[in-house]
Image (cartoon, helix red, strand yellow):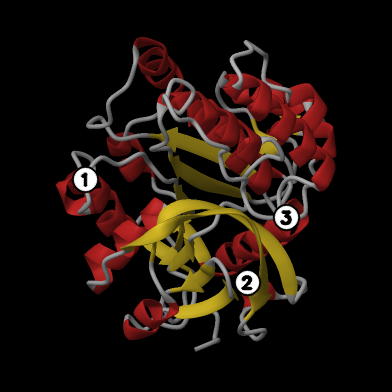
Amino acid sequence: MPLVAHNALPTFDRLRQGGLVVHSPERAAQQEIRELHVGLLNMMPDAALEATERQFYRLVGTSNPIAQFYMHPFTLPTLSRGEAAQAHIAHYYESFDSIREAGLDALIITGANVSHANLADEPFWDPLIEVIDWAWDNVTSTLCSCLATHAVMQFRHGQTRVKQPRKIWGVFEHRVADKRHPLVTDVNTRFDVPHSRWNDVSPAQFDAAGVKVLVESAEAGVHLAVSPDGLRTVFFQGHPEYDTISLLKEYKRDLKMVAHEPKRVFHPYPARYFNLQAQAFLAEFNSRVIAGENLDFPESLVLPLIDNTWHDSAEAVVGNWIGCVYQVTHRERGLPFMPGIDPNNPLGWV
């Protein structure tokens, strides 16, 4: 079932324009279908704040026909924000205090920009840990994206991420490592996932923590893993929520960062993302810019040549996640699991 536009967040209009069905609260009240309340702790920087809303709202809204979804965005006050983002958050986002009081069925925690080698030195660390701790005791399942995965692995399991010699960047082929888990039911045994990160938590680190790896890549490492109980925490190291254009925007941004370097060289492409024709357009652009020409980035030429090879699998995994949450959640305050469900093994999978 669709998302419910229970506030005036502009993301709902953008999603409608993209063809996603979004119900008004009045329409939702006419449906005899259970509602699920999903929190989104959006820690992304200003430039990606609203895009991240759309990406995760779209994944949830198209994932599963069994419920109507009420999304509850919030962020952390210690994150530095510009005036426009502050106004957006003040107008449309909820406070963690109000979310904690009302309760959630599920929670998604995004990544964030960092400036310290040790995540515990980041200004957002303490309030993030407060949310993670609360969710562990009060939310049926928390889905952690990229940096949030690294934070939970460090805080709860003592496994610190490791800086890699090269950025793990591109669209990588993955394989399902354990086909028994409900999160990968009816998902292709081999599928693509985008990654964009310098740091990694290795399969050995997940194993040492007792965290079960479900999907991994020979090149990019672990993508999907679950806490020992099978559901309470779901870990993503990749970015299945990415739009088709996301890595192109990142490549364009990185080019701007090196534009004024005196010995600028060709910037590496994200793996398995640009086809040969797109690479030819970008190579010509780079050559002419290095030669001193002032050119617009050829986005309109390159974007139609990029294939999205990951969204269907992302939708399937998130749909399975929502299905698992629906199966075990119980929305009375203080009772996140249905009576008779073992919180240490809610899916009967372990």
Looking at the picture, which amino acid does disc 1 mark?
His
Near mark 1 (Cα within 10 A), the count class, few <14, some 14-19 or many ≥20, is: few
Q: Give whichever of discs 3 and 1 has the lower sequence position.
A: 1
Of the residues tagged 3 and 2, which is closer to the observer? Answer: 3
Left or right of 280, for residue 165: left
Looking at the picture, which amino acid does disc 2 mark?
Leu
Camera-side residue of 192 and 328 = 192
x, y (%) of residue 338?
49, 70
Left or right of 209, for residue 85: right
- Which residue position holds label 3? 310
Q: Give whichever of discs 1 and 2 has the lower sequence position.
A: 1
- Asked where in the image residue 156 lies, by quadrant, the reply is bottom left
Left or right of 29, for residue 47: left
Q: How far apart in space, not on screen, are marks 3 and 1 (Cα)?
A: 31 Å
- Which residue position holds label 1? 116
Give yes or no for contact between labels 1 and 2 (Cβ–Cβ under 8 Å): no
What residue is shown at x 42% (from left), y 25% (from top)?
261
Label 2: state its secondary structure: helix
